[in-house]
Amino acid sequence: MENTSESTASSSIIALKYGFINGLLSFLFSTLINVMGWAEQFQESISWVSTIWSLVLSVTISYLCLREYREQNEGYISYGQGLGLATLLGAISGLVAGAFNYIYIQFIDNTVMQRQMDIARERMEDQGLSASQIQSAEEMTSLFLNPGMQFVIVVIMSVVFNFLLGLIVSAVVKREKPVFE
C-alpha cells in the first residue's frame, strides 16, 4: 500500500512539472501571435500553425511525462495510470495557461478581445449578414470573450484534449508489470 501512495505523489509532481511547462509554452506561443499581430495578418495560416504547434507540443509533453513516470516506477506504467496522468497533466496545463491568459487579457493587453471582435465583424460583413444578425452574433460572442469565461474554456478544453490524447499516448507508453513476477 505504501508503494501506491509514493506512486501517487510522484505522479502528481511529474504532472505538475510537465503541466506547468506545457501551459507556459502554450501561453507564450499565443502571446507571441497576438503581440506580433500575426492573428490579424495571417488568420487562416496562423490557425493551422497554431493547431500543429499545439498538437506537437501536447504529444511531446505527454510522452515525456508518461515516460518519466514509467522510469520512476521500475519501468512500468499501466494504461489506466497513463490515462489518469495525461488527464491530470491537461488540468494543470489548462490552469496554468488559463491563468496566464487571464492576467494578460485583464491587466496587460485588454484590447485583444476588441481586436478579435473587429475581425469577426469584418468576416460577418464580408459574408453579407445584416446589421441585426451581426449585432446578435456579437452579443453572443461577447459572453464567451470575457477573461473569466476564457479561463474556464481553456481549462475544460485542455482537460478534454489531454484525456483524448492520453488515450493514444498511454497505449504507446504503457508497460504492464508481469503477472507472475
Image: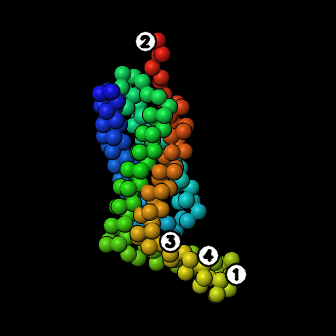
Q: Residue at x 45, y 59 (%)?
A: 154
Residue 6 % position (x, y): 30, 31
Q: Which mark is residue 144?
A: 3
The residue to which callout 1 is attached is: 128
Residue at position x 34%, y 30% in the image: 4
Determine whether 36 is above or below 16 in the image: below
Secondary structure of the residue carrying tag 2 is loop
> In the structure shown, which secondary structural element does the residue marked by tag 3 occupy?
helix
Kindly identify which numbered label has been placed on residue 123: 4
Q: Residue furthest bottom?
A: 131
- The x and y percentages for residue 13 are 30, 40
Query: Image quadrant for the N terminus?
Result: top left
Q: Is residue 28 above or below residue 166?
A: below
Rendered image: mark on residue 104: none
- Give the crowd class for mark 3: few <14, some 14-19, many >=20 residues within 10 Å: some
Q: Residue sitting at 52 percent across and 49 percent down? A: 161
Q: How far is mark 1 from mark 3, CA to CA?
A: 23 Å
